[in-house]
């Protein structure tokens, strides 16, 4: 009975895929994949169906019909929340593709962060953080979630320690003999160079 389960599941799901029409308006995903559950119950009626990714996905947040005047920002670290549901005018994130400004109504995007300055603009006030790495999740409903591995306000960085760290890692890079030592030293140089640029910028 179980030998044919995978074939029957593929057949049912394949038929479902051929009947589905494509459009640019994507609805929120259903909480349960009904076709999969139905097919599962035919081949294994006494066993509960396994969870699919759809069971863990929250419905897509609604996109407002007009662009809001403010951007809602959440900025979290592994051990604390720096900013929670704060309405701001703009954020600028240090994406791996370059500095990226995010305004209300920005197209939905996921951006990987590199070491650099994250700036939060609220009226005439600008708050700057140095982030080591992470991701920015920009949603179509003008909400931006920023997750960083480590971050510190720029005004709390000690310039003398940055210069010392840059000199130390540059020396380690010049004297490295293995690929591992070179990689570790290069990371140190990149981070301290970004810290130095954050202080001078």
Image (tube, rainbow, N blue to C red):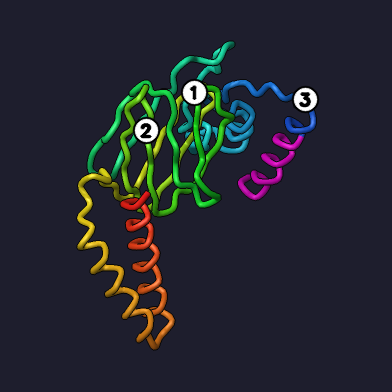
Residue nearest the observer in this picture, 12 or 168: 168
The picture places residue 189, in percent across and down from the top left corner, at 37, 68
Q: Residue at x 51, y 43 (%)?
A: 111
Q: Dot 1: few (<14), some (14–19), or many (≥20) neighbours within 10 Å?
A: many
Observer-nearest residue: 121 or 84? Answer: 121
* Residue at the (27%, 75%) spot, across then down: 168
The image shows residue 164, relative to residue 157, as above or below, that is: below
- Quarter of the image for residue 190 reads bottom left
* Secondary element at tag 3: loop
Residue at the spot of label 1? 142
Q: Quadrant of the N terminus?
A: top right
Question: Residue 73, how many percent across, how many down?
Answer: 38, 28
Q: Judge whether 194 appears above or below 15 on screen.
A: below
Q: Which residue is mark 2?
A: 120
Of residues 55 and 64, which is closer to you in this image?
64
Q: Taking the image as drawn, is residue 21 in sight?
A: yes
> Which residue is denoted by mark 3 in the rendering?
21
């Amino acid at each position: 009975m179980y030998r044919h389960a995978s074939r029957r599941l593929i057949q049912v799901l394949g038929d479902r895929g051929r009947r589905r029409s494509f459009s640019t308006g994507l609805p929120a995903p259903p909480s349960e994949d009904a076709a999969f559950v139905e097919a599962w119950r035919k081949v294994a009626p006494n066993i509960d169906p396994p969870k699919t990714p759809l069971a863990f996905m929250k419905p897509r947040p609604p996109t407002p019909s007009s662009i809001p005047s403010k951007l809602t920002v959440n900025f979290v670290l592994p051990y604390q929340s720096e900013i929670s549901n704060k309405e701001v005018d703009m954020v600028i994130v240090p994406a791996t593709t370059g500095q990226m400004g995010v305004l209300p109504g920005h197209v939905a995007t996921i951006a990987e962060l590199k070491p650099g300055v994250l700036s939060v603009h609220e009226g005439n006030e600008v708050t700057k953080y140095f982030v080591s790495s992470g991701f920015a999740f920009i949603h179509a409903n003008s909400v931006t979630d920023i997750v960083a591995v480590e971050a510190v306000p720029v005004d709390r960085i000690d310039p003398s320690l940055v210069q010392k760290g840059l000199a130390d890692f540059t020396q380690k890079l010049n004297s490295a003999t293995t690929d591992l030592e070179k990689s570790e030293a290069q990371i140190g140089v990149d981070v301290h160079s970004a810290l130095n640029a954050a202080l001078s910028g």
